Image (cartoon, helix red, strand yellow):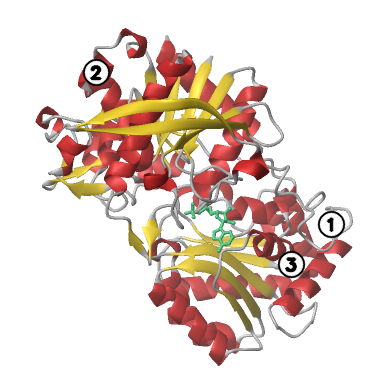
Amino acid sequence: MKILFVSSEVVPFSKTGGLADVAGALPVALRNLGHDVRIATPKYRSVDDQKFGLEKIIREINVHFQNDTYTASVKSAPLPGTSIPVYFISNDYYFDRQELYTTGGKDYPDNAMRYAFFCMASLWMLQALDWKPDVIHCNDWQSALIPAYLKHHLYLRTNEFYNDIKALYTIHNLAYQGSFDRTTLNSIGLGWEVYTIDGLEFYGDINLMKAGIVFSDAISTVSETYAKEIQTPEYGCGLDGILRARSDHLTGIMNGIDYTIWNPETDKLIPSRYTMQNMRGKTICKKHLQKKCNLPVNKDIPLIGMISRLAAQKGFDLISEIADDLFAMDIQFALLGTGEPDYENVFKKIGEKYPSKAGINIMFNNQLAHEIEAGADMFLMPSRYEPCGLNQLYSMKYGTVPIVRKTGGLADSVIDATPETISDGTGTGFSFEKYDAGTLLITIKRAVELYTKRKKSWKKLQANGMVQDYSWTASAKKYEELYKILSR
Ligand code: ADP
């Protein structure tokens, strides 16, 4: 089959979160199943033409919006290490910017136009290339207009080339919806007939996530539990009703992870590689991480790692509530993250108050992310909600035991450690259900106690996680099934 994968971020070209990891890995797994997969993504400033060998393949595509015509060019380069073509939609005015979506912590005011332009140019590009996919796989609000354009854009829906192209829409995080003032509707090339309760209308605004949900031929999200959760008012972010209405077309497919990048046996970004049979390298990684975070070097103190966007979703209010109790314990903590200024300040203060226990790194740094995965003993993810979560999967592979709240993909991948689950091989971490600071503290204490008092059980728990297989192959097969159903 022919599949165009459309994503606003793709590893190794651009990344703010998990979507980028997915976009850099799922197409490869699909290609390995024999499909002709190609990727469309914006040409941001972070995409270095020289380094990645970009070549201009289309000089000019005219994109008409209202009374204005904008032009895009298309550059292309293979996804590194593969022959998968990546098409970079280029327009310096829209994409040659420092950050992907924000400036000074605030969304760019023209985000609706930027991604409408991206969607429209990606579509017109197909005809210019004379390459017609069976399915366009769209992801999150940034590419959610594609299904709307296929069905409702005057020129596209009447153009035979686009007639029977199907659209799959994947929700990676329902909370980021792309809501804009309704007056934007005409500027992004759609008419008032889609401004309805069954269309883009959402409490007086337009909502691009909703466009993806209502106009795609099928919807997926990134874990089975999240697929159920988002149909409830608690997790539905106001869209649960429309998701329930389309529940026949909604599936959950757990993300995989790329073991060519995240594997302690081969990882070149960590100071020493290790295997389940020989974990000596992990001790070296821990020592290295302790030094790097200015923490006392001691292999026996449990070191808890955390790598995350600093956003409310990730449970930081719980951590700040228990901070004093947590640091009263004989533990160390290594945090890597950037995001909301309030949370950055909370952690900076924690770093100042507990300099010998907390290594706080307010930055985005891929190398340090690998070093934390390898060097920490435990990994903390007390998320309020978590569509899939990747770091718990990386952590298991690195023998770093995850401590998670039982929600979304965390519920689907981490099984709570009890004497039974540890010994029968199913236990892979520590999980708690109630979103509550006291419950989090008790769960961390359970983990620390097992680590310090029951070394043998701890080793078995690490091993249980390390043998899990979250490679992309199984998930890619599920997507393949979906594509097949769509194009029947
Ligand atoms: P989300 O998509 O909600 O941010 P995921 O767990 O799905 O959460 O994916 C987050 C990805 O981003 C992981 O690969 C993680 O290692 C990475 N990441 C998050 N913050 C940082 C950071 N500050 N530095 C490096 N990598 C980060």
Left or right: where 162 falls relative to 347: left
Which quadrant would the N terminus be assigned to in this image? top right
Q: How many marks?
A: 3
SS class, disc 2:
helix
Separation (CA) of disc 1 from disc 3: 11 Å
Query: Whole-percent x and y of residue 357?
Result: 64, 85
Q: Would residue 41 be seen by someone viewing this image from the given angle?
A: yes
Residue at image location 27% in from the left, 26% down from the top: 149
Identify which residue, 33 or 101, lies in the foreground.
101
Q: Amino acid at mark 2?
A: Tyr
SS class, disc 3:
helix
Q: Amino acid at mark 3?
A: Gly
Label 2 packing within 10 angstroms: few (<14), some (14-19), many (20+): few
Label 1–label 2 contact, CB within 8 A: no
Query: Whole-percent x and y of residue 243?
Result: 28, 36
Q: Amino acid at mark 1?
A: Arg
Q: Would residue 232 be seen by someone viewing this image from the given angle?
A: no
Query: Whole-percent x and y of residue 143?
Result: 37, 36
The residue singled out by tag 1 in the image is 273
Label 3 packing within 10 angstroms: few (<14), some (14-19), many (20+): many
The residue singled out by tag 3 in the image is 375
SS class, disc 1:
loop
Residue at image location 40% in from the left, 33% down from the top: 72
Residue 155 badge: 2
Q: Of label 1 and label 2, which has the lower sequence position?
A: 2
Residue at image location 59% in from the left, 57% down from the top: 416
Separation (CA) of disc 3 from disc 2: 55 Å
